[in-house]
Image (cartoon, grey):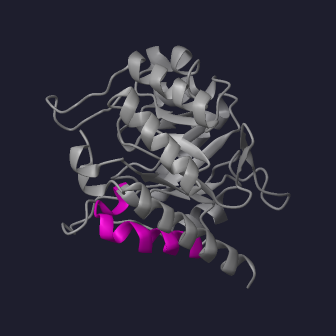
Amino acid sequence: MKNIKLAALQGSGRTIVRVGNVKVGQGFTIIAGPCSVESEEQTLETARAVKAAGADMLRGGAFKPRTSPYAFQGLGLKGLKILEKAREETGLPIVTEVIDTRDVSWVCEYADVLQIGARNMQNFSLLREVGKANKPVLLKRGMHSTIEEWMNCAEYILNDGNPDIILCERGIRTYETYTRNTLDLSAVPAARELTHLPVIVDPSHGTGRVGLIEPMSMAAAACGADGLIVEVHRNPAEALSDKEQALTPKQFEELARKSRAVHKFVGEL
């Protein structure tokens, strides 16, 4: 691999991405919240619950790129305003996805971290646009992408002047059908070997099964991940998207406690 900027800090320390009082890359950061912002009541209730359970940041989709054009596509600007209200009430920084170059500047007015989803990992125009933004970027690995391709996409953002990138392994598409994707945890130490950037894991999309999310979260903590991003809903059965992989607040509380315990234990070895 010939990535230049990604290797620039190797040997002289790792990048810590600061989001308000949160330092991604220092300790174990957990981002949690609903797949989609569905209503003010649903978002605020979930935000309060994940805050109480130990989340460091709130995730929530105002724009939802969906496989089917008939699926719920998100509330757009209304959703961003709801997320803003959740931040004001809980103090949790907001992580939300941006899917269009035309939206970057005004999504920046509401979001603390701009998420580039798996489907947009190689949307090079979008990568360049968030590279010019004064906001941290959470870059998810594409479902059909190699680690090298993922690293090159981070280079696009770095080359346009944005040093605050959080890499996210969220599973890749294989011939396995039991899980939604195959969570490639080998990508975590590989990415940490190749770059100075913090690396987190999304076990929700990586497995698509509630029963697998907690054990894979602990495995992510054990293999060196700097944190997690997980989907939590106040009532998963009512979720408008990804209900099969949404945790209840109580399940999330257990996951956060156990994952942080594993991270601490491994760090003391």
Of residues 81 and 2, the one nearer the viewer is 81
Give the percent coordinates (x, y) of residue 127.
Answer: 52, 31
Q: Is residue 91 left or right of residue 34?
A: right
Give the percent coordinates (x, y) of residue 193.
Answer: 65, 65
Give the percent coordinates (x, y) of residue 46.
Answer: 44, 43
Classify residue 111 by image quadrant. Answer: top right
**The furthest residue to the bottom:** 269
Establish if 96 lies above or below 49: above
Asked whether 234 falls inside the magenta stretch, the response is no
Give the percent coordinates (x, y) of residue 83.
Answer: 49, 28
Q: Is residue 204 left or right of residue 189?
A: left
Asked whether 207 falls inside the magenta stretch, the response is yes
Q: Is residue 217 left or right of residue 137?
A: left
Magenta segment: 205-222
Classify residue 130 by image quadrant. Answer: top right
Q: Quadrant of the C terminus?
A: bottom right
Q: Quadrant of the N terminus?
A: bottom right
Q: Residue at x 27, y 48 (%)?
A: 242
Classify residue 30 by image quadrant. Answer: bottom right
Q: Residue at x 77, y 56 (%)?
A: 14
